[in-house]
Every structure is written in structure tokens, then in C-alpha cells.
Image (cartoon, rainbow, N blue to C red):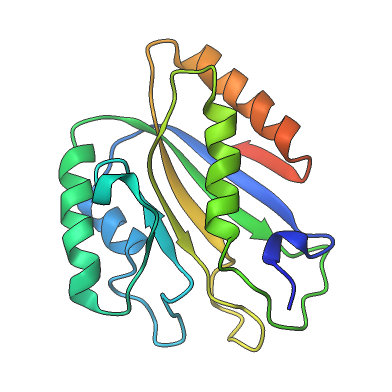
Amino acid sequence: MRTLSKISGIRLKGYIQFDYSPVKRDFYNFFRTFKPVEENTEDNHFYSPFFAKGDIIRMSDNYGDRINPLDSIYSQLKRSKYLYIRLEYDFTYAAVNEEYYTDNEFKYTIDKLEKACKGTDLYIAFMVSHFNQLVGKPAYLEKEHYHILLSKSRDTEQSIKKFLLQLKASNSNIQMYLMK
């Protein structure tokens, strides 16, 4: 079974929103508290330096196990504005007819993002993956994606430019777009 990032033709598309203020309903989505039955959480992970000493945590199917980190992380992030990125896998040019392996994708992606943050005053304040193993699933399920909140700095424009240049240099299959 191939790793998602190793499937030929898959690209990453990032959608950026400036001045994002976290709201609780977004965190209910991030932690998949109202997910359809077809979606699972077993391949999903989350990270925040404000929870579990900054460890990467596998998301549980148990509702209660998702509410505790949701409340803890949201209480830390709700007073600030962030750079929000929705990073999704684009399957347009990839023939994905078999199951793929997603277990190390979160670590691989967070490493790329942290590397792109080096030399800027941006850091990852929160990140969560939403993986559904789309093969054989209903077409209405969302593409495999991440929700990412980056801290904002005083010199946001310069930091973001440097971050985007470094991210593009580390992964030529990524395209970034501005959200309206």
C-alpha cells in the first residue's frame, strides 16, 4: 500500500485566510464532533503546543476524548487572530483506485510546515488532519485535508512571504490561494 504523499500526480492546494479569529463551531468541525457515519477519525491527528506538551495525538472515535482537547486548545487560541490555512490533497491528476496509507502523512506535513516557518516569527498554533480514505466511499465526502492555524507576527507580510517561499521550495507540488 502506498503512502498518500507518494502517489503520483497528487498535489497539495492551500487556501489562506488572513486575520482568522477562532470560533467554537469551527473547532467542533476541526475535532469532527458532528461527523457523518461514513467518516472515521482513526487516521486523523491533531497538534497544538498548548495541549499534551505539543505531542502529535491520534484522534479518538470516542466523543469525550475529542471534547477535552477541543475545549483546552480553543480556550488558548480564542483571544488572538491567526493565519488560517486549509491544505487539501488534489486528486485531479492522480488515479487513486486502491487504499492508501495515511499514518505518517501528518508528521510528514507538519515537518514541512515547521521547516517553512524557520527564520520567520510564525509558528503552528494548531493543526488537525481530516483523512477519510476516499476509495470506495461516497463522492460527497470531502477531500483529504488539514486545518492549520499559524501564529501571526507584527511583520506578518514579510513572514508570510518567506514562509510561502520556503514551503514551495520544500514541496514543488503545492499551490497556495488566497481565500476571500
Answer above or below: position of 147 versus 157.
Answer: below
Q: Which residue is at the front of the view, 153 or 51?
A: 51
x then y, percent, for residue 116: 59, 30
x then y, percent, for residue 117: 53, 27
The answer to whether residue 179 of the structure is visible from this angle is: no
Q: Locate the N terminus and report the quarter of the image it occupies.
A: bottom right
Q: Which residue is depicted at the point 36% across and 32% down? A: 82
Answer above or below: position of 67 versus 1.
Answer: above
Q: Which residue is at the front of the view, 133 or 115?
A: 115
Residue 61 lies in what quarter of the image? bottom left
x then y, percent, for residue 53: 27, 45
Q: Is residue 80 left or right of residue 41?
A: left
Q: Which residue is at the front of the view, 123 or 11?
A: 123
Q: Which residue is depicted at the point 53% across and 75% down? A: 132
Q: Which residue is depicted at the point 45% across and 80% down? A: 39
Answer above or below: position of 108 versus 179.
Answer: below
Q: Which residue is depicted at the point 45% across and 16% down? A: 156
Q: Is residue 135 left or right of residue 138?
A: right
x then y, percent, for residue 164: 63, 28
The answer to whether residue 20 of the structure is visible from this angle is: yes
Residue 168 lies in what quarter of the image? top right
